[in-house]
Amino acid sequence: MAYPLSSSFNIPITRHPFFHHTKSPSRIFCFTKNQLGQCDDDTSLGITQRIMKTVIPILIASTIQLSSMVPYVSSPAANAILYSPDTKVPRTGEVALRRAIPASPNMKAIQETLEDISYLLRIPQRKPYGTMEGNVKKVLKIAVDEKDSILASIPAELKEKASLVHSTLIDGKGGLQVLLQSIKEQDADKVSVNLQSTLDIVAELETLQAPGLSFLLPGQYMQYPRLSGRGTVEFVIEKGDGSTFSPVGGEERKTATIQVVLDGYSAPLTTGNFAKLVMDGAYNGIKLNCSNQAILSETGLDKTNGYSVPLEIMPTGQFEPLYKTTLSVQDGELPVLPLSVYGAVAMAHNEASEEYSSPYQFFFYLYDKRNAGLGGISFEEGQFSVFGYTTIGRDILPEIKTGDIIRSAKLIEGQDRLVLPKES
């Protein structure tokens, strides 16, 4: 029996409305100066009469054939997140993973100031290169003046490596000086490339600052496997019908490789259970089921010995995960590891209780902004234990079809960070 993605989820997922959330269009919401609330849409004449009587401009957020409704949210925090045209929810796994690293305040200030440049680059026509230059100079000052503070939090055995990474950040290949020069040349393409390189160096230094968990796990969860940091799983996918994947370099491929980075910083129990299952070979030979928004692993193999881990979600701005509870996006809550990213990897819900994840059934989320809510946020955001992102092979995900097989899954990085419970 399959474990559901939600309480109403059942295989086959290709016919299930889980991701669509259709609602009755029998009522609409009217927005006025006084937020007058709901009004009947019995006829277009009735609406017109209301407008004429109140003499207040109102926004009618529906049509006669409206198939889904998003309720008006009055929370200021929710308005800021959901209604802003410049919502800063990470849109790639790399950005989400970088933001999830529990680094020092100085390093986070460097990261956020540099990330602002990526938003400035989106401005059409005349780009604010002067502002970008100011951002890089600000970062340079922090990196130079606070060097001792940045390196102080790094374990002794990693300090030498961290010092080299710090030097590279200042004036090495892909560092801040190179980025500054490309901004002065006002070459947007070069700035974009160099900015990514600089942020990669920042992430490397931040990771050295965070060799383990930044919080203590609750005592009742110490019996679960846990991943105290990052890990990488490599999947080899094979076509179930004998066909091939898109050719690379003119050569057809019978298999394709996908890599997923596991984030134990934000979901140590979920990643620990998943990493153990991978090392036990539980996913080798597993078939996949596909819908338009998810690729779901099949379940029920006798060789799986996964733990039923509690739902584990770390809210943005918090220092430890919440357990057995979902987030309310409408109230302004967002997870550190958002689902609203193409290639996000999460555990399905446990069949018995949505307070727990499935012991072993997981899915790749095929985020599509066209099927998302305001701000581009998935309707299912904050409801699942997201634990990693596809970083290599995202282009393969659309080619995976129902019946394709995980030929092998291997933990290629992070074995030293996997802590297994002591056998009693």
Image: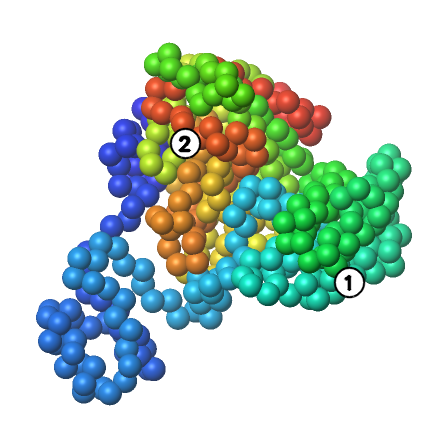
- Amino acid under disc 2: Pro
Q: Which residue is mark 1?
A: 138
Q: Position of residue 244 (x, y in %)?
A: 42, 17
In terms of secondary structure, where does tag 1 sit? Answer: helix
Reply above or below: 41 against 318.
below
For this rendering, which residue is in front, 201 or 284? 201
Name which residue lies at 18% across and 87% down. 53
Q: Position of residue 15 (x, y in %)?
A: 24, 34
Q: Position of residue 405 (x, y in %)?
A: 42, 18
- Amino acid under disc 1: Lys
- Judged left or right of residue 167, residue 417 is left
Name which residue lies at 38% across and 67% down. 73
The C terminus lies in which quarter of the figure? top right
Any mark on residue 120, and which? none
In terms of secondary structure, where does tag 2 sit? Answer: helix
Q: Position of residue 70 (x, y in %)?
A: 31, 60
Name which residue lies at 47% across and 21% down. 247
